[in-house]
Amino acid sequence: MSKEIVNRVANSQLITIDLEAHYPEGKRALLDIKPWLFQEQILREKEFREFANNHNWSQYQNGYLALNCSSDAIIPSWAYLLLTSLASQYAKKVVVGNLELLESLIFQDVISNFNAVDYQEKPVIIKGCSEKKIPHSAYTLLIQKLQPYCKSIMYGEACSNVPLYKAKKK
């Protein structure tokens, strides 16, 4: 006599949120302006504007761009504003910083558009493993967004998870 195998996870109300499924497509790029500086230290406006105007900004079409300077040069704010005005004609998002900051800010936008009300009074598991690199900050933003609504929040997989939050009984 064999007993029927029942998939309790599939039959449960547990909702899995996989941030990888919300990963925005588009190339991520870093533009280091150090070579555009005189002796890689001094910004000369005329030469800097020439570099900026001659740069192939279309290579960032539908992508994401981080602007930075890897030297210890003091870069005036207008320089990053100028580059952003040129790059934003092509790129979906432009930030001043490194690729890690860029990815965090991309996911900040993703999470801010997340409708947490859809998870009202539901048990949620935030999937932990993904092929694409999801920044830690995305997970912290997500749990903050979900916590006021969810019945419970776990991290990992349905078969092996870490409980993170359980709402108090009303």
Image: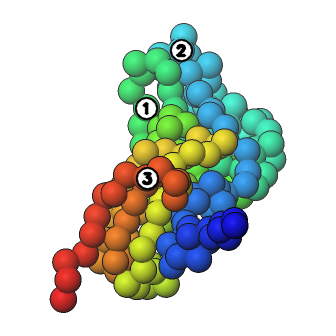
Q: Residue furthest top?
A: 39
Q: Which residue is mark 3?
A: 161
- Cα–Cα gap, marks 2 and 3: 50 Å
Instruction: List x then y, in percent, for residue 66.
Output: 57, 40
Q: Residue furthest bottom?
A: 170
Residue visible at 75% across and 36% down in the picture:
55
Residue 136, above or below 169: above
Q: Is residue 22 left or right of residue 158?
A: right
Q: Which residue is mark 2?
A: 40
Q: Are marks 1 and 3 in contact (CB under 8 Å)?
A: no
Q: Nearer the viewer, residue 81 or 150?
A: 150
Q: Is residue 104 left or right of residue 1?
A: left
State the SS at label 2.
loop
Give the quarter of the image for residue 39. top right
Q: Is residue 38 left or right of residue 2?
A: left
State the SS at label 3.
strand
Residue type at mark 1 is Ile
Q: Is residue 18 left or right of residue 169?
A: right
For the N terminus, the quadrant is bottom right
**Does residue 105 appear in the picture of this structure?**
no
Instruction: List x then y, in percent, for residue 38.
Output: 56, 16
State the SS at label 1.
loop
Number of marks drawn:
3
Q: Which residue is mark 1?
A: 75
**Does residue 31 appear in the picture of this structure?**
yes
Residue type at mark 3 is Asn
Residue type at mark 2 is Glu
Residue visible at 37% across and 65% down in the picture:
153
Instruction: List x then y, in percent, for residue 147.
Output: 32, 71
